[in-house]
Structures are given as C-alpha cells and as structure tokens.
C-alpha cells in the first residue's frame, strides 16, 4: 500500500485551510502524510503566506513532521500527488460580490450556487478546473480530485462529463448540517440515526430512521421545518464546532442551519406535503418571494452574504497572522462552510483506508435516483470505498419533487455546457430555464451585465463580451 | 358499422357551438348524424336556447334532417351516445375573470391554462368531468369523450388516471395555429409540410420538414419567432377562417398566432438555441417578465383576456339571436379558439371513419416522449384511428427543454391530485412548484383568496375554505 | 423537387430483381426514374447479365425509357444516386447452405436470420455494408439506403451504430404476410384493418383492429395461430402474388405464411396467453423442439431451405434466360421473400413523394418500444415521410414477451459488435447468449467450424481462423 | 428498544436448523433472544423432534436460558414474533426428486431453482408463503420475514408483489461462496476486498476491488473461472466451515464452489468477455450443454442432487439423534447450503442492531440495477439497516449480460404469476420462455407430467390437473 502521502490543496490560501489542516491532524494516525502542498495564484500570494504559516504552526504544535509546501507553481505541486483538493475562488470574493449584487440590483435573487451568481461562478470556475484535470492526467494520473469549490455539483459534473476524469468526488457541508438538525430535532445522537439523502448539490432531500427502524422523517419535518423557532430549537442541542458551548449569543450556523441563508420558515403545509425533508437551500425554491425580500434588504444595507464574508475573512486573516496562534480559531465558524474541510479530510481517509464510511457526496448517479439518467452527477448517500463512492439507491421521487429536480439537473447541464463552450445562446438558455431567474429581457440584461463585469475571468465568452462593450460604447 | 350517430355536447350553450355545428355540416357526407344534443345547466339556459336556435337554423339551412335537442338533463342526453364532447366552463366567464384578476392583483400572472388561474380551472372542472365519466360508464359505455375544456391536458389526464376511462381525447387549437404560422413563414402550403409535435397541452414544441425531407425547423424559428414582426408576416399569408380576407384591420388571431396571447417577441438567441419551435404559450415561461408586464397593463385597464372575452361573448350572443342568421358569424373569430371546434369534428370523423389522419392531441404517452413515463398524458402528433390516437414517437428532448417539460408534467399531476382529493397541502404544493407562481407567502395568499372566491364550485376544498372564512371573520 | 431519379441496387444479379423491376414499373407514375443500376461482383456476373437482360425486356415491354445499367463497378453506380437498395448475399447460396447445415450437423438449428446461420450471415455481410456506406458518404451523401439484406435488422443497426449513417431503412416481407394472414383469418379486407407491429426483425408481434375500432387480436390468434389448419385456412382467402389463383396445389407461401418456415402449430395455450400475435419466426423460440426436429429431417434429406432455394434459383435463372419473357415469372413466388422487393419500391416512392404511408420497417426506436433503449433499431409500424420513417408508439410489452425481446436485442448488439471488431470472445459471447444455440462446448465447436468454413469472407476473424487451422493441422 | 426477542423458524425440522442454532449462539451477545420457535407440519413431526432436541442440547451446552419451542401450530408460534425465517420445503425431498428427475427423463435439465424444477418449487411454495404472510399481518405485523426457501428470489418477489408485505429479505449462500472464491483466487483476506453483486437470485454477477481501490475482477476471472482446476485451487485456501481442515478428501463445497453444482469449466473466452464474474449457477446458461450431459449421467445412476441430498439427510438425522451431540456436526457441510443459516442470523442481528453491514440479499430494486424496473426484486449488495436493506447502485450491464438478465426476470415474474393465479396458460408461457427448458411439445409434456406428479401440493392448478387425469384415463 502506498505510503508517504502527498496531498495538494489548490486555493490553499483560502480562509478554510486551517480547518483542513485541523482535519488532517485529527486523522494523523490514519493518514501517513508526508507532504501537504498549498497552491495559490499570484493574487492570493499574501493570503497563502499568512495561512501557510499558520498551517505550519498547527502541524508543528501537533508534533508532526509533515512538510508544508507553499507554492504558486501548480504543476510542481501536482507532480505525483495522491489527493488533490480544490477550494479555489476565481475572481476572489469581489467576484462573488458582483454575483450577488448585480442580480439584486435588478430585483432578482443572486445566490452564489444555483442562482444567477452560481451560474457565473460555474462559468468562471469550470474552465480552470478542467485545466487542473488536464495537468492531473499528465502529472498524477492516479490521484483523486476532491472538489469543494462551488457550485460543487456542477463542477464535479463538468470534470466527469467534459474532463473525462472519473476519480472525482464533490463535497458539501449541507448534508452534515441537515443530519445535525435532524438529530437535534429528534433529541437523538446523530450516530443512532440512519439517513438517506438524494438530489443535487444544494438541492437535495433526505429521510431519517431511528435505531429501531422506524422512519422519523415526518417528526423531523414537524419539529424543525414548520417554523423558524423549531429550527433554532433543533440546533440548540447540537454541540457544533461553530458554537461549541451552545452559547445562544454565538449565532453561528444556528441561524438557519447554515450561515449563508436566513432562517425564514417554510410553509408548514407545503413541507408536510413533501413527505421528505428539504435542505436549507430549498428555501430559494419553496419560499422564493420571502427569500428575495430578505436578500433585497441585505442588498440595501450593503450586507449581502458576500460582503459580510469579505469582512469576516479580513478579520480572520488578521487573526491568522498572530504568530502565537497554532490552532484553528473558533471565529472561523462565522465564515460559514463548517464541516466542509473536515468532510474533505474524512473523504480522503475513507478512500485511502477503504473505510466504507457513509457520506453524502456528488458522484455519478448510476441509477441511484431512478428519475435521472445514469450518467449525471447527483448528491447522494454513498459508501466510500478505496475505489471511490458507491451510491445507495434512493429510488424515485413523487411528483411533488421529481419534476423540479429534473428541471434543476437540466439547468445545471445547460449551464455547464455554456461554461465549457462559451456559447452565448446556451448561456441565455441556462438563464431562461433557471427557476431562480425570471426569464425574458430581465434575464438577458443581467446575463449581459454580468458577462461584462466578470470579463477578466471569462475568456470563453470573449466574442459576446466584445460585442456588448461595443454596443455600450 | 354503426349508423344514426348520436353526438352530445356538454356545455352546448357555449359561444363556440356554431363553429361546432358548422364543422359537422362540412362533414355531413362522412358522418351519418341522427341526433345532436346540446346540454347545459340551469345557469346557461338562456344561452343554450339562443345558440340552440341558431344551430337549428344552420342545420335547416344546410338542408339536413338532423335532430337538434336542447336539454338541461345530462343523463337523458348521454343515453346511448356515440360521441360526447365537453366544452363546459364551470362558473362561467365570471370565474375566469377571478382566475385572472386575483393573481394579477398580487402582481402575479393569472393565465387561465397553466398558471394560477388554470390550476383553479382544473380544481373546478375535474370533479365535474369525472362525474360525466361516471354517467358515461353507465349510459354510453362505448362512446368517445372528446374534451376541449381547458386545461385540456390536465382534464384528459384526470379522466384516464382517476376516471379510469381510456376512450378520451384532448384537443387544442394551438398546434393548428402553429402549423399555419410555419406554413406562412416558409411560404409553403400546410399540406406540403410534415410536422411533429411533442410536449404537453399549451406547452409543446414542434419540428417541420418540407416535401423533400429537408428539416425547416430553423428556418421557421428564424422567420417567425425571432421578432414579433416576423410572426405577423408569417400570419399574413394565412387565409384563416378568422380573417378570411386577410384583412389587416381584422386583427383576429393574427396578433400572436392566437387571440389569447399578446405578440411579444421571444429572445432570438434563446429560441435559436432551443433548436425546436416553441408554442405561443411558451412566452409565459421564456419571457415571463415581459408577459407579466403586459398582463398587468391589461389588468389596470380592466382588459384582462377574460373581461375582453366576456364583452365579445355578449356581442356574439346578440348576433346569434338574429333569426335571419343561419351561418357561423365571422365575428366568432375574435372570441379566440378558432379551429378548436373544427378539430373536434375532424377528430370525430377520423375515429368514426378510421381515417388515420394526422392530428395533434392529448393522449397517453406510451413512450412517444421518452423523457416522460408511459402512463402520463402528453400532447403529441398522432395517427387517429377507429381505436383512437396512436402517438408518433417523438424521442427525447435535450437539456434545454427536457427538465422544464418534466417539471410541468409533475405540476400538472400535483394539480390534478389536489383537484380530485381536495387536499389543501397538495394544492399548496402545486402552487409552490408551478413555475408561473412565485412560491412562498404570496403563493399561499393567492391560493387562499382564490379558494374563497370560487368556493361555490369547490366542494372538495370545503374544510379549508371554512377554516379560511373563520379566520377572516 | 429532384427529378431524374437514379436508383442503384447492389446485388442486382439476385433472383429477386424481377420483382423489384415490376415494383418500379407499377409505380412509374409516381417515380420519375431515369436510371436503374444493377451492381454485382465478379462471381455474380453471369446472373447479373441474365437478370439484367430480363429487366431490360420488362422495362421495354412497359413502354418506359428508363436506362438499365449493369455493372461490376460499385462506385460508378453509386455516384449521385438517390436511392440505394442492398440485396446482396456475401458468399452466395453456398454460404447459406453452410450456415444451415453446419449447425444441423451438430443437432442444432441453423436458421439463416437469428440463429447460428444468421449470425454468420451478419459476420459476412456487415463489413461489406459498412464499406458501401463509406462509399455513399463520398459519392451520394443525400441518398437513402434501403436494406433488404438479411439479417435485415442487424444490418440496419450496424449502418446506424457503426456506420453513423442515419438515412437507412431495413425492410422485411414478414409483416406484410402477417397482415394478409390476419385479414384472411378475419375475412376482412387488409385495408379495412389497422395493424400495429412492434419488436425486432423476424422477432416482432402485432395487434389488429377492425374499422369500428374493436381489437381483433384474439380472434386472429384463435383462428390462425392455434392450429396449422387454421393458418392454411386463413391464407386461403388471400389472393397473393405467390398464388394468384388461390390454387391449392400451389403451396407457395401458403404453407406457413412464409416459404422459409414449416407450418408447425404453436401451442394454443401459449399463444393465447401472449395476447399479441407472434410472427412466423417466433416458432423458433416458442416451439424450438418441434422446429429442430423438422429441420433435422430436411437436413437428412438434403432439403434444408438453402438447398431448396438453390435449386429453385437455378430453375428461375433458366426461366429468366428466355428472351420472350418480359414479366416477372410467377414461379418466383416459390423462392420465398414475396413482397420483399415490392416493399422496397413502396418505401422508395413513399420517401420520394412524402406519402406518409404506413409501413413496418427497421428503424431507430426513439421510444416507440419503451422496453428498449431509444438508440437501438427495432422493427415497428411507421409513417413513411420524405424524411424517412417515424415510428408509431407501441408502448410496453408484458413479462411474457418483454424479457425475451430485450434478450434478442442484446444478442443482436453483441453479434454486430463481433462482426465489426472481429473479436473472437465477443463472437463466442453472441453464440452463448443466442437462445437458438445451446451454450457450452457445442456452441464453441460450431462457431469454430463455421469460422473456418467461411474464412474467405471473414477477414476480420483472420487471427482466430489461423489459430484454428493451426490447431486442426 | 425491544428486548426478549421471539424468533420463529418455519420448516424448523429441516436439517439446516443446527447451523441456524449455532449462528444464534455465536451472536448471543448481540441478540437478546427469549424464545426460539421451531414450526413444522405433521409430515415433519419426527424430524422436528429430532432436530429440536439437538437444538435444545446445543443451547443448553452454550449455557443459555433460551426457550426452545417445538410446535405444529404455526399461528401460535407467529403470535408477537419479531423475526420469522422460512426454510420450508413443500412436499419434502421427494418433491425435489420429482422436480429433477421428471425433466431429466425427457432429456431436459431439472434444476431446482431456475429450471423446470425450480418453477415447480415456486408453484408449490408461493401459495404457502403467502398464507404465512397473511398470518403475519394478523399476528405479528411488525416482524421481519427472512426467507431462505428456494427459489429465494421468486419467493421474495411474490411476498412483496402479491403479499404486499415489504418487510421481507431473501437470502442465499451463493454470494458468500463467491466472495470466498475471489479471496482464495487473489490470496487476499475476504475482509480486505470490496465486492459489488448485482443480478437475481442464482443469476448474479460480481466485481471485486482490493484495499487500494484497484479492480481485481479480471484477475479473479482468470484465476478461478477459466478452468475447473483454477476454481479448486482458489477454494483450497478457504478455511470453510464445510471443510474446516482443508482436507482434500472432504470434497465439501470445494467441488464447484457449491455442493449443488458440478465443477464444469466455463469457456475461458466467454467469461473473459463478460468482464464481470458469473455465479456458479451461470453454468446452466453459459455451458448448458455440458451441464445437461453431467446431469443425465447422475440421473442414470440415481444420483441426482435430490437423491444424494436425501441420503445425506437421512445420515444427518441419524447423527442428530445422538443424545451426546450438542454441536452442529461437521457432516452437515455435505448437505450443501453452507452459510445459508449463518447468513440468516447475521441478517437478523444486522436489522436488530442497525449494524449497517454489507450483505447480498434479494430486495426491491429501487434503481440499483438500471436495466430493470424499480419495483422488481433483485439480488444485490446492500447495506443492512434497522429498516432493512438499502441496495448499493450497480448501474447498467452491457449487452453481454443485460438482455439475459431481463429475460430471466420476466421468466420469474411469469412463473410467480402462474403460481399465484393457477392459470395454466401462464404456466406454459413461463415454461416456454425459461431458457433452461426447450420450448414446444416437450415443454408442455413436462409441465403436464409435473402438474400431475405434484398434484397434492398444487390446489391452484386443480382444473388443469383434473383435465389431464381425465385425458390420461
């Protein structure tokens, strides 16, 4: 068996990195790491150095002899890597601010994963990821790619469909939070419950059973999803890394089960009718109107999620600079994305050690969800083996969820196609069919404005952007 | 072979009836009609008498000995019928006005077929149609049910799925208009073109080939669907019954290919990307924003489609009263729905005479559209035989249309389920997933307001309505 | 519209050619033919000349000015062709004799279409057809390929799947005979019945309705398929070209509905249980044992179908030589395959004239049969348009037919793959899973013996054949 | 959580019972058993007493206070049971002897699971199992039914499809033996390998990966399935309960990986082409001819498997009588079916303790195998939770296996339908489409002969049997 693992993190200068390092340290007995490479680009050099130094201090404090390499040379890092994780953000947080604010300036939800913003994140990110895959084919053809760059499901699909690289797994922290909420709602230990998740990234549902085999799905819906107060209460019982002392003042993820999303209540009759538990992001689809209102208020105040995160990050990097800091600071929890990096570490050790653990990941459907083609990427409960994820069969959805799921999958496929081809009409189609974007002139206006705003990172759309700029001048 | 046909029209007092009578007269050599029964309810008695008298004059003028029976006794009419057509409107046009105005009063598209309005039309109509089917099982178990009551696809699906009655065909005039537009755009005779339609009622696409086998789909898109002017031009060449002299002052159906819908242009790049030709109703999905704006203007002026139609109908009935009138008056064209009744007559003669003609109807999918289950109702090109429609295989849609189609089908199934069960949470789910209704509190508000407004026709929702009225008092 | 049609027949020296010529002459008003090219190979030169001269006499006697070209130069013939029909037989009838006799010498059904013999016919034919397709891409890229070379379904599938040529239609005369039998059984005119066929070439079922829409499938099963006498009686009423005078001494196709197959009775309870009408070839699957017995008797007597056909053909060519003969001689009927060539002519005129006639052809499934993938070739009732066949939706089979159908399709796909790749293990797999070939050493023995016997026509299997010959020496 | 488990075994007088008891004893710390009920019928009373006494001695020797109840009163036993296992044999081994010998007397494979014999076992067993399910609905509605009565897949499917009882799992020992063979072939520990099984009971394939994620499927095929010697060698390394000392004289399961089946070699090129590993029973389909030859030899010698087993059983019961015996005697291994009962115990503890262990069971497909409908029973790798099995997604088969699998599933469905309805034509259809039974008169002859031979246990076929007996007299 291979020893002396080389693990590479692209986007290593991210504020998430300390959690990742912490995750590896926790698993030091399982993972014979020799080298950790943190890779970033020139624009991220300063952050890379700050966070890289912290990483070194953390590893040292843990008494480990791992080599920490900081580099801007991606190819050097990839050479003979065993695992590559990607947590990059093309255009940094300023791009995300545009992703969110431009749509909102037209009265439309921005939403950095599945809305207009998420589509642009896909347009910017997918070409870069496909480049990384090309490098991997050459430099580390046996490595696994662990993606937690959003939109995680679309990026994973692009890697398989257009990169023709099957050794990839997409990760997200939402299923972890959902499980904690369910446990909290049921006042059970998480490990005493059995979960099945099915759907797409940021668009999945789940069911839950207790230790005696009784389905508790409806109880969870009732307790945690028919009122915002129920959700807060369910989260109270959760001793989370975000809020380890269950301090009610630490709002942490407790607000809506996830930092990114306001805790607005679902319509009780609607979620009861579903019969399965939605994820936090379903608010965008099930209570669109209310979410939009909340987002517009944040927009007015200059407090869109991206803007808040940018401030949080600045604070975090100030903390990271402290030469006495050698652990992941608890303030990272406010950043959102808790468990994300930990999930990546757990996935890596599960593959490496063939642990056959049960995780929810983005992977090829292969029939797990009967309502979708075999060859698309879904986010689904899986057994993690040394050969990667094996999905558990979910079966079929009923008509209250099925069509919407199929619609979202095709929105994803159309978006990915636009990202890869740079075809403007495909991009417009993706905007047209995205349920979070009202179609018509408004959609085209936003699309065009965003193309120009992000032009630096969208070489594939050069022709249209030049046309638009000509028109505007 | 059976002779002495008995044909029954439920909702016989409709303003459409003269076209239906004209259609039968045109086919007098093919259809050995003995009795035509026009059935209506007490509230429609006056209209029934007016239109029934006109029908008698038309038949007499045509020199035919057919018996015209006017009755309020549905069961008497159904006894031993060979064909039953349904063109009823539960709650009359006043209900339609509510269907359209209530959503618009909240800034939401009403749309009497697939929007909030159409869902309420389904809620009111489906229980009545299922009652008719029960009567048919007893009184005329070999008859065919020809439905052109909207929402035609949902009603047809309900008859099959919940009424367990397979001898039903749903009709619509939109595919006929689409074919005429294509012919006009290509400057070809309609009969020289080959069409394939696939999708759902008011939500289908088509492709077209010329006599030499060359696909002309893209040419039609370019000529008629990338600008409103193109569409007007395509329609110019059409010598339609609506505007037999191609009089440019007779706006007739010429406005948007259909009276119901304003001629607002699709986004050229979007329809080109589709690769298949949308129907007029796709405007609601592809240019939602623009359609809403137009509808809101009509709403402000008290000129929603329902209000316009109500005035048109009043004028029509004035005309119908003229004892010297013994033909279908040309003004009927303004009513919209041209070809609808004619299509019903053609369907009846095709079944009766096993004509194997090519029509676009709502019928069981049976694999025609691979992306939908076999047992759902689709609107698709079919061969009409003595045993009913046999769909032509459409195959698969690509991701630009597939998911949206699947989504709409499940919206339909959820709506139908709510209509049949009277379950409030299912109705709310249908509102939530309908892409024309923004979800959240707004959806629930409109749903509740409409339930109360239509309470007279919604006995199945009695419990919720009483609860709402209690709350409101 | 194109005029001056150029039609090319590859395998023009076939004994079928006079029927083809007759078919074109019958349609002279529909088809503006300028040139008919009959192409053959050196080994068929003599037959080509005999049958070509007869063709010329036939055309002349019909008073037509069509040019008849006889050539061994396929590429010259294909240049600018509008339609290309293929009726070739690689290895001539001697190869078919081996196809049938080698398996029978081991006590196994040979069967020239779906059995061991048919698989070898596929192995020999598919590479030649794919060569023709390559020529067509270059020389007549707009032409339609009309294939009636057996195994017609597999050849058509190979053209689409491996030749990537979609303008191909596979033909067979069996559905025509089935329709005539049904009409005879019901004592109805064929044109008064509506048929739906679904399945694969030589492996399809059908249903039938009368003019009033009543399904008559069970009546046909009872009358014609529960006893051999019933079948003979059903055929009596058929005034077929094979036996135009209904002469009971002319056994023609009357024996079993098709010359190729002995009229052995199905098991009545089994065909009743099917609920749909089998084709003649289903005898091989439903009464395997009895068919084998009959074939073994013919084998003993040197009267396998191939041997009989070889003698019939020799007699036919003697007749064809008669300079006074200028019509298709009635004796051709004994050859079997009646209507085959006529169907080809009808298909050509249907495409050319966009006749939208209803024919049963091998074409891409596209959902017509829900139990099979969209992209495989099926034999199914279709509308023939200028753009080729559009299948009618068949829907699903029940468990009595479905699995066997799916099995046969995969046997076909495996056989085709072996034919194209020359991979021996794939060929052995195809033999193993073919339900007409007992698996195990016997299958391998027959496979190997046939590979060697046909080595001249199987360059793709060169490696294995050389190995076998080495072993045998 | 429930305590004081009550476990009921129907067919408790079986020779397998000691292994079952041993299995429970091994898991005494996991399973808080209070009562074990062994149920049998009058005809099995003596065996029940013998084996029941042994069971009591075994439990006592293990120092356990479990109550062992022996009863002929099934309803009393079922009352408030937690788990019910079924290992009954309707008609005892004499019926199995007929199942095997009657077909062989006509030169046809009998095969007690999927061949003619297995179909009759289904005909006899399914009505009894459905009766048990009816009792369970009334007496122990929360219990799980653990079926290891053959044909295990068909019985499980019948329980779900016709008994409408979902809490059922079908078990088989073949996947366990396959895993041991693979481990032996690879010289790896079984627990270091990851297996995925997919297919039907006695008709599944598997793939295997090592601890580093490398697929070893081809290595296993090459080592163990391309020659009989390879298989023997692979089994040598297995320290099996059958042959705990690896004594080469103890042929045990070592013959072919399973006692029931002779170790005849697959065709190497064929299994290589499969690309996935067949199960032992695939010999019947892949080397039919060779298997038949072997079976006919056994038939001649009066040594069909059933006859051998009958003798083995008699010997076993002699051993069981020994009052000094208080362990499972090693000779039981010769009986075949090793691990079967152990698997049942493991399943029970996995459900009871929510162990989420990985087992191969017959359960509802739910998309696990994309090539089969969601609602059929398949045998597939599953996670065993307190709510029963959750299948791992297998995905699709390629054309070398897919069609044959689909064919077998429909043979099963047709057989089950015949078993439930007693419809003779459905039974004949099942015989006709079963690939192990040559169709035609031979099939009908065997079917009829077996109906009469088993008439005592086939009340549902009374009408046909009386007809046959009338005919024969």
Image (cartoon, coloured by chain):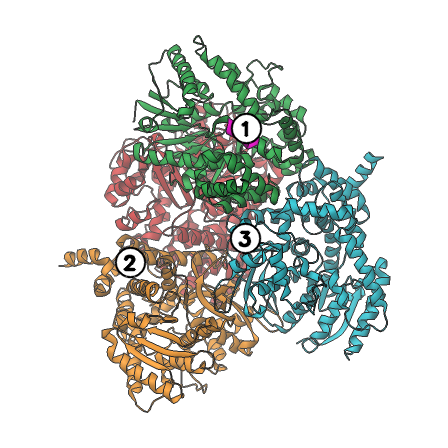
Chain colours: A green, B cyan, C orange, D red
At label 3, counting other C-alpha atoms closer than 10 Å, the crowd grade (few under 14, some 14-19, many 20 or more) is some
**Residue C126 screen position, x and y as percent:** 31, 63
Write down the chain letter for disc 2.
C
For label 2, the residue is C443
Q: Residue at x 41, y 56 (%)?
A: C407
Write down the chain letter for disc 1.
A
For the residues labelled 1 and 3, the Cα–Cα distance comes to: 65 Å
Q: Nearer the viewer, residue C384 or D53?
A: C384
Q: Nearer the viewer, residue B204 or A1?
A: B204
C355 magenta-colored: no
Relative to A233, residue C268 above or below? below
Q: Which mark is residue A97?
A: 1
Give the structural element (helix, strand or loop) at label 3.
helix
Tell me the magenta residue range. A94-100
Residue C448 position by quadrant? bottom left
- Total residue callouts: 3
For label 3, the residue is D420
At label 1, counting other C-alpha atoms closer than 10 Å, the crowd grade (few under 14, some 14-19, many 20 or more) is many
């Amino acid at each position: 068996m291979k020893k002396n693992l080389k693990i590479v993190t692209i986007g290593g200068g991210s504020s998430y990195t300390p959690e990742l390092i912490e995750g590896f340290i926790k698993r030091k007995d399982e993972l014979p790491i020799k080298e950790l490479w943190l890779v970033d680009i020139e624009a991220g050099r300063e952050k890379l150095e700050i966070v890289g130094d912290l990483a070194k201090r953390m590893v040292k404090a843990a008494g480990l002899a791992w080599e920490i390499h900081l580099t801007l040379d991606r190819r050097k890092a990839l050479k003979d890597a065993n695992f590559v994780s990607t947590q990059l953000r093309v255009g940094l947080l300023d791009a995300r601010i545009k992703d969110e604010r431009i749509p909102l300036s037209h009265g439309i939800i921005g939403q950095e994963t599945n809305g207009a913003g998420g589509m642009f994140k896909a347009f910017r990110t997918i070409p870069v990821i496909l480049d990384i895959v090309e490098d991997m084919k050459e430099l580390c053809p046996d490595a696994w790619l662990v993606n937690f760059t959003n939109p995680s499901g679309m990026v994973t699909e692009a890697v398989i469909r257009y990169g023709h690289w099957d050794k990839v797994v997409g990760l997200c922290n939402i299923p972890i939070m959902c499980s904690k909420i369910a446990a909290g709602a049921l006042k059970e230990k998480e490990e005493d419950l059995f979960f099945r998740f099915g759907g797409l990234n940021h668009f999945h549902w789940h069911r839950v059973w207790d230790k005696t085999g009784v389905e508790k799905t409806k109880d969870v819906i009732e307790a945690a999803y028919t009122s915002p107060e129920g959700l807060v209460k369910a989260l109270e019982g959760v001793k989370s890394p975000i809020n380890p002392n269950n301090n009610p003042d630490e709002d942490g993820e407790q607000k809506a089960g996830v930092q990114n999303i306001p805790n607005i209540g679902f319509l009780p009759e609607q979620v009861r009718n579903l019969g399965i538990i939605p994820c936090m992001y379903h608010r965008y689809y099930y209570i669109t109107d209310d979410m939009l209102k909340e987002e517009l208020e944040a927009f007015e105040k200059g407090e869109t999620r991206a803007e808040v995160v940018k401030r949080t990050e600045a604070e975090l990097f100030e903390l990271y600079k402290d030469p006495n800091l050698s652990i992941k600071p608890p303030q990272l929890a406010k950043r959102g994305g808790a468990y994300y990096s930990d999930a990546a570490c757990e996935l890596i050790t599960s593959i490496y050690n063939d642990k056959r653990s049960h995780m929810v990941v983005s992977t090829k459907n292969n029939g797990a969800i009967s309502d979708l083609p075999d060859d698309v990427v879904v986010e689904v409960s899986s057994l993690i083996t040394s050969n990667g994820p094996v999905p558990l069969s979910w079966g079929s959805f009923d008509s209250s969820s099925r069509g919407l799921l199929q619609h979202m999958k095709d929105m994803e496929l159309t978006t990915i196609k636009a990202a890869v081809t740079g075809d403007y009409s495909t991009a417009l189609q993706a905007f047209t069919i995205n349920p979070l974007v009202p179609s018509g002139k408004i959609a085209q206006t936003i699309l065009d404005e965003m193309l120009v705003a992000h032009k630096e990172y969208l070489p594939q759309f050069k022709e249209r952007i030049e046309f638009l700029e000509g028109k505007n001048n």
